[in-house]
Amino acid sequence: MKTTLDIADNIAIQSRGLSKREHVPFKELVEEGLQLVLQKHAAAPKRAVKPVTFKGRGVTAEFQSGAWTDIRDTIYAGHGSCCHAGLD
């Protein structure tokens, strides 16, 4: 694929010098650099997501056997009747 890149002058100058010294086309240097970056990111460890907990004992007794709609209605009580329309 053919593309155009804007490269910082100092990087371009150093890269062209390396290309001449090593007798390697500039294109190959760019491809090698991109490949190294792709490998680095592919090998980067995934960050573990820490679960969010609230050090409680779960839902209160009044909601333990209740339906989600009952819990939701209690949460939204006094906040307008349209807040939970269509969420069933």
Image (cartoon, rainbow, N blue to C red):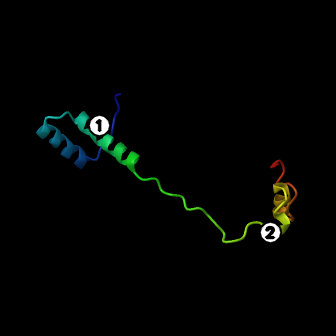
Q: Secondary structure at mark 1?
A: helix
Instruction: Please state if 52 lies on the left or on the right of 73 as rendered.
Output: left
Q: Tell me the CA gap for discs 2 and 1.
A: 60 Å
Instruction: Please state if 88 lies on the left or on the right of 45 as rendered.
Output: right
Measuring from the top left, give residue 56's x and y in whole percent: 70, 71
Measuring from the top left, give residue 45's x and y in whole percent: 42, 53
Whether residue 65 is visible here, answered yes or no, is yes
Q: In the drawing, what numbered circle is on residue 31? A: 1
Can you say whether 14 is above or below 66 in the image? above
Question: In the rendered structure, which amino acid carries the disc numbered 2?
Answer: Thr
Question: In the rendered structure, which amino acid carries the disc numbered 1?
Answer: Glu
How many numbered marks have been drawn onto this rendered protein structure? Answer: 2
State the residue position of label 2: 60
Q: Secondary structure at mark 2?
A: loop
Can you say whether 20 is above or below 66 in the image? above
Q: Quadrant of residue 39?
A: top left
Can you say whether 68 is above or below 39 in the image? below
User: Depth check: 11 or 46 in front?
Assistant: 46
Give the farthest residue toward the left. 21
Q: Which residue is pictured at 81% across the width and 59% down the height?
A: 72
Q: Quadrant of the N terminus?
A: top left
User: Depth check: 16 or 59 in front?
Assistant: 59
- How many residues crowd around disc 1 within 10 Å: few (fewer than 14), some, or many (20 or more)? few
Q: Which residue is pictured at 21% across the width and 43% down the height?
A: 15
Whether pointer 2 and pointer 1 mark residues with C-beta atoms closer than 8 Å, the reply is no
Q: In the drawing, what numbered circle is on residue 87? A: none
Q: Which residue is pictured at 54% across the width and 58% down the height?
A: 49
Discs 2/1, front: 2
Whether residue 83 is visible here, answered yes or no, is no
